[in-house]
Image (spheres, rainbow, N blue to C red):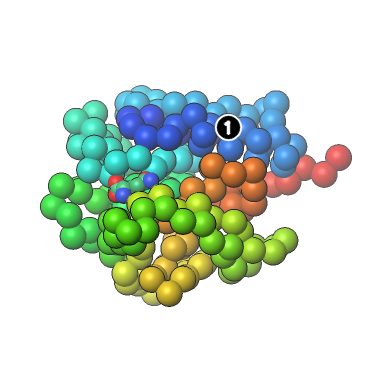
């Protein structure tokens, strides 16, 4: 069944573990799934999908290189659920030279795009294809997508830019769904990995 890894080099790891566990439970896969921390290429080889958490993208990028995870992440066959700093890492282009982006989503991302005056804020977002009404999103020193290629499906946009995208099995979000109780985006991601909702 589902084996979900959470990259645990830096950032908000336990929130992602808890959010995936509750999404899997809601989908009826609570008992047959595992959610665990990933720190090495060997850990990564154990999972069929991965979360890239928020945190400090420059630090996470440096630790990815240091732990020999850069090439294994680029070659990872499963979907990646990336939030905030994780979204920065998924890009093809990032202005900051300290970031070594993974190039897994065809997009250019701006770090800290909202500036110091608006370090954090919340917004109710209309997300393309998400049933059940707007998604309450928490943004913390958030990035935005500046441009995206044709293969990228834009899921949500606010006046400052694109804040949610999908490419193939990957999902990248400027905001932090793992900080709330709403697991609809986790469930959507898991469904796209072939993990169906079990009806009992
Ligand atoms: N601005 C941070 C960065 O680029 C990301 C912040 C976050 O993940 N909450 O590293």
Q: Which quadrant of the rendered structure holds the N terminus?
A: top right
Q: Kindly identify the residue that appears in the image at 32 percent across and 59 percent down.
A: 117
The residue positioned farthest toward the left in the image shown:
97
Report if residue 45 is visible in the image.
Answer: no
| Observer-nearest of 177 and 5 | 177
Q: Which quadrant of the rendered structure holds the C terminus?
A: top right
Residue 26 to residue 165: above or below: above
Q: Kindly identify the residue that appears in the image at 82 percent across and 44 percent down.
A: 199
Q: Kindly identify the residue that appears in the image at 70 percent across and 35 percent down.
A: 25
Residue 138 to residue 33: above or below: below
Location of mark 1 (residue): 18
| Observer-nearest of 121 and 137 | 121
Disc 1 residue: CB within 8 Å of ligand 1:
no
| Observer-nearest of 2 and 125 | 125
Q: Kindly identify the residue that appears in the image at 47 percent across and 70 percent down.
A: 157
Name the secondary structure under disc 1.
helix
Report if residue 186 is visible in the image.
Answer: yes
In x, y percent, where is residue 66?
A: 19, 30
In x, y percent, where is residue 150?
A: 39, 74
- In the rendered view, does 75 fall on the left or right side of 99? right
The residue positioned farthest toward the right in the image shown:
200
In x, y percent, where is residue 183?
A: 63, 46
In x, y percent, where is residue 146?
A: 31, 69
């Amino acid at each position: 069944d589902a084996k979900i890894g959470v990259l645990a080099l830096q950032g908000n790891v336990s929130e992602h573990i808890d959010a995936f566990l509750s999404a899997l439970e809601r989908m009826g896969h609570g008992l047959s799934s595992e959610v665990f921390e990933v720190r090495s290429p060997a850990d990564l080889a154990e999972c069929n999908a991965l979360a890239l958490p928020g945190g400090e993208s420059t630090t996470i990028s440096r630790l990815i290189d240091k732990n020999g995870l850069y090439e294994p992440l680029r070659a990872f066959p499963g979907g990646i659920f990336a939030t905030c700093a994780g979204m920065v890492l998924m890009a093809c282009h990032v202005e900051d030279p300290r970031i070594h982006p993974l190039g897994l989503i065809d997009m250019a991302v701006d770090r800290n795009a909202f500036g110091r005056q608006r370090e954090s804020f919340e917004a109710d977002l209309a997300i393309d294809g998400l049933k059940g009404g707007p998604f309450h999103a928490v943004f913390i020193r958030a990035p935005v997508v500046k441009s995206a290629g044709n293969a990228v499906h834009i899921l949500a946009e606010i006046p400052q830019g694109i804040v949610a995208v999908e490419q193939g099995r990957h999902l990248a979000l400027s905001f932090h769904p793992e900080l709330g109780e709403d697991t609809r985006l986790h469930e959507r991601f898991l469904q796209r990995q072939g993990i169906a909702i079990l009806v009992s």
